């Protein structure tokens, strides 16, 4: 689909003249990220764990929560951690599990089976946990939408501490002993964008600060929290929450820990991925680690991913990574099959503002992936639903301008359960009549909100620059913006009127474009690489001029290191 190129509005000179940075392009990048004060700029460019990590006790209920957990440790009470089956939920479960074990607590773990139990607390799980004698349950990455289940726990004398980060429902589970969720409307915590694992991490920090008051025989050792940052980084990147503010610090330091992780299971995953030996960055987490961790919960049970992450045994890890790889391969195969059928359905309604696909016995763990691919292809919100008799389990993915979970809130009378973020949601509907009414209602909301809008995908370009601006000093400045992710994307730049000096197809099947380009009044040529842009090779000749949108990266080959422009989009120049 053709993209609209949008060069972001430059800041007025008087707004950025006091920035502690001389390079004008770098000033613009800071401005586009909402960084306009010297202190905020310094915090962004120089993340400091000791100075920038926020006090966990700024959560209103944190004191209450950690005192109850530490009392359980002192009184030898078992504690149940109730997690979730995606990478954030699995990592959050592992973070809290590792910490509670250090306190000497007998820890139980319940990660629901996606296909049978669905997301969040469910009545059958509640009854089994009660029957097993637990008096304290801590949810991670879930629970905020489970008012009835939390009330059921309380009626049977079980206290619940909810740690979550998902959007606040219409009614909170006020039967809980404590609710730790930064996204609540009345949250006293100054940063709203922690993922589920980030919230679990704040619990661990608070436990470490408070544990000496309880004279425990087993304690969380000093510095233990920092060795959890590898899991915090994986989850924060994988759940696509903002990489500004506290999350930037957590991921920056988490990448340092991940690159020297002590976890046998995580090391096995890294070894498995093409025997990777380079530095692990946020992109590697997103493309390589997270899909594998997610695969277990998508096609089977996420317990295998959890056991791998917490494993300290090399032999056990070797067995579990084999299972995880098999599940990941199965996930890829199932995704491709469902996507083919879903696209056939979507083609018939592609002019609608909300795209739907429904399939009998589709795997509930896969429909979110398919919805994401359809949404990306058509640049429209998409919902893909797995139908099993009268039960409809769906996932939605959206575009920036349509809050899909907000739309669910307007349709909640038809829903058995739901949750999510503005751009991603999950839900369950019981009964065909309910589903038909829900589908009609949601489609009407999308139609009303999106009609008349230009829905072509937009490439947000940081600045139009020249080849003369691109050198190693500029690249080193860009490195200081890493890690890239939500709210801090890898910068895109535009250069116009590039003259083609050399042009060729490259890659095993000739699917990529490589060219040397120059610009008037600039003596140095630059290499550009366009992955899957080889079709342009038949449309271009030496001497033609191009406008190119690109990322700046490095090409390393045979111990040579050079700057390279990675093409995101291009077109012939209008001369």
Image (cartoon, rainbow, N blue to C red):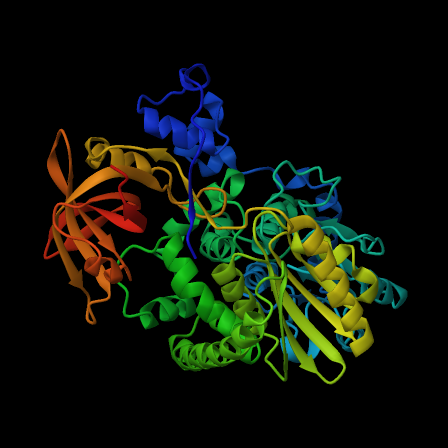
Q: Is residue 535 left or right of residue 182?
A: left
Task: Between residue 380 and residue 324, name the one nearer to us.
Answer: 380
Q: Nearer the viewer, residue 153 or 504?
A: 504
Q: Is residue 145 above or below residue 435?
A: above
The answer to which image quadrant residue 62 occupies is: top right
User: Can you see residue 143?
Assistant: no
Judged left or right of residue 246, residue 332 is left
Residue located at (53% from left, 45% from top):
242
- 374 vs 177, nearest the viewer: 374
Q: Position of residue 183 (x, y in %)?
A: 68, 45
Q: Is the C terminus in the top left, top right, bottom left or bottom right quadrant? A: top left
Query: Could you tell me residue 89's position as x and y percent?
Result: 59, 63
Q: Is residue 381 visible?
A: yes
Q: Measuring from the top left, give residue 131's x and y in whole percent.
A: 80, 78
Direction front: furthest residue: 575
Q: Which residue is at 38% across, 75% downward?
A: 314
Q: Is residue 44 left or right of residue 128?
A: left
């Amino acid at each position: 689909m053709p993209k609209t190129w949008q060069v972001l509005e430059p800041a007025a000179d008087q707004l950025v003249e006091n920035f502690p940075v001389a390079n004008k392009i770098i000033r613009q990048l800071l401005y586009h990220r909402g960084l306009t004060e010297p202190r905020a700029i310094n915090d962004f460019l120089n993340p400091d764990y000791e100075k920038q990590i926020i006090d966990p006790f700024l959560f209103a209920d944190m004191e209450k929560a950690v005192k109850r957990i530490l009392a359980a440790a002192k009184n030898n009470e078992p504690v149940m951690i109730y997690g979730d089956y995606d990478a954030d939920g699995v990592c959050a479960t592992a973070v809290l599990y590792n910490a509670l074990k250090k306190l000497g607590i007998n820890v139980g773990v319940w990660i629901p089976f996606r296909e049978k139990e669905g997301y969040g607390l469910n009545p059958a799980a509640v009854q089994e946990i009660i029957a097993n004698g637990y008096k304290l349950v801590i949810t991670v990455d879930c629970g905020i939408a489970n008012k009835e289940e939390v009330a059921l726990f309380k009626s049977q004398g079980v206290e619940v501490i909810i740690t979550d980060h998902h959007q606040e429902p219409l009614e909170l589970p006020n039967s809980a002993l404590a609710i730790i969720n930064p996204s609540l409307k009345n949250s006293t915590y100054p940063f709203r964008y922690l993922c589920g694992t980030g919230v679990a991490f704040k619990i661990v920090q608070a436990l470490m600060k408070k544990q000496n008051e309880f004279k425990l025989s087993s304690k969380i050792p000093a510095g233990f929290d920092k060795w959890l940052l590898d899991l915090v980084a994986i989850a924060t990147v994988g759940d696509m929450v903002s990489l500004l503010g506290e999350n930037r610090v957590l991921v920056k330091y988490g990448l340092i820990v991940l690159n020297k992780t002590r976890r046998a299971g995580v090391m096995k995953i890294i070894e498995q991925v093409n025997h990777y030996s380079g530095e692990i960055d946020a992109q590697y987490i997103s493309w390589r680690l997270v899909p594998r961790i997610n695969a277990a919960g998508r096609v089977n049970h996420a317990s295998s991913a959890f056991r791998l992450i917490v494993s300290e045994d090399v032999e056990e890890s070797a067995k579990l990574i084999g299972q995880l790889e098999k599940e990941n391969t199965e996930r890829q195969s199932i995704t491709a099959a469902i996507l083919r059928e879903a696209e056939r359905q979507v083609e018939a309604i592609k002019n609608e503002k909300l795209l739907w696909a429904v399939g009998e016995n589709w795997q509930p763990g896969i429909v979110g992936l398919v919805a994401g691919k359809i949404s990306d292809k058509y640049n429209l919100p998409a919902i893909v639903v797995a139908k099993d008799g009268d039960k409809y389990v769906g996932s939605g993915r959206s575009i920036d301008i349509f809050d899909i979970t907000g739309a669910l809130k307007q349709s909640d009378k038809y829903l058995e359960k739901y949750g999510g973020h503005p751009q991603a949601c999950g839900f369950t509907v019981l009964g065909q009549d309910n589903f038909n009414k829900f589908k009609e209602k949601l489609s009407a909301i999308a139609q009303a909100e999106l009609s008349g809008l230009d829905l072509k995908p937009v490439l947000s370009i940081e600045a139009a620059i020249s080849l003369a601006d691109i050198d190693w000093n500029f690249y080193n400045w860009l490195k200081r913006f890493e890690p890239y992710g939500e709210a801090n994307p890898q910068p895109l730049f535009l250069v116009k009127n590039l003259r083609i000096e050399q042009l060729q197809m490259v890659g095993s099947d000739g699917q990529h474009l490589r060219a040397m380009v120059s610009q008037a009044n600039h003596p140095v040529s630059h290499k550009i690489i366009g992955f899957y842009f080889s079709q342009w090779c038949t449309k271009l000749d030496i001497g033609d001029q191009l406008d190119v949108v690109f990322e700046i990266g490095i090409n390393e080959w045979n111990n040579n290191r050079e700057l390279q422009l990675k093409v995101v989009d291009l077109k012939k120049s209008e001369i």
